[in-house]
Image (tube, helix red, strand yellow):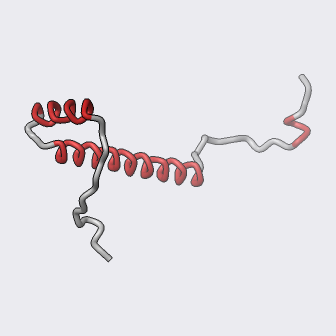
């Protein structure tokens, strides 16, 4: 099985108009269309990883619970007492 960091080529089908815009963008950034797409896809994947890590941390905090200070213990009658 190939290593996960090993590079692999992919093929895309884009409209001529999109390809022309991509050429201009790539030239403005001093890179190729391949380099431009690689950078964008890697950024998307990294953002998704960051989001998943944040969600994992948030769920872990919720499972642990939060200290809400001293909470008085009340019985059922005291909770439903009419004033």
Indicate the position of residue 78 as horizontal and vertical percent values.
87, 36
Q: Is residue 31 above or below residue 20?
A: below
Q: In the visual, does 57 lie left or right of 15?
A: right
The picture quadrant where one finds residue 27 is top left
The picture quadrant where one finds residue 29 is top left
Of all residues, the one furthest to the top in this rendering is: 83
Of all residues, the one furthest to the left in this rendering is: 30
Q: Is residue 26 above or below residue 46?
A: above
Indicate the position of residue 15 as horizontal and vertical percent values.
29, 35
Can you say which quadrant of the picture contains the N terminus? bottom left
| Residue at image coords 23%, 66% | 6
Identify which residue, 73 or 43, lies in the foreground.
Answer: 43
Q: In the visual, does 60 lie left or right of 46?
A: right
Identify which residue, 51 or 36, lies in the foreground.
Answer: 36
| Residue at image coords 91%, 38% | 77
| Residue at image coords 44%, 50% | 52
Identify which residue, 6 or 56, lies in the foreground.
Answer: 6
Indicate the position of residue 47 as horizontal and vertical percent values.
35, 45
Q: In the visual, does 24 lie left or right of 16?
A: left
Indicate the position of residue 26 as horizontal and vertical percent values.
15, 36
Can you say which quadrant of the picture contains the C terminus? top right
Q: In the visual, does 78 lie left or right of 33?
A: right
Of all residues, the one furthest to the bottom in this rendering is: 1
Count of residue discs: 0
| Residue at image coords 85%, 43% | 75
Q: Is residue 45 above or below residue 19?
A: below
């Amino acid at each position: 099985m190939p290593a996960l960091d090993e590079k692999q080529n992919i093929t895309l089908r884009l409209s001529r108009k999109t390809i022309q815009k991509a050429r201009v963008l790539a030239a403005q950034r001093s890179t190729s269309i391949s380099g431009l797409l690689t950078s964008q896809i890697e950024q998307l994947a990294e953002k998704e990883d960051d989001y998943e890590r944040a969600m994992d941390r948030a769920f872990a905090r919720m499972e642990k619970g939060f200290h809400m200070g001293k909470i008085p213990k009340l019985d059922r009658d005291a909770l439903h007492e009419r004033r």
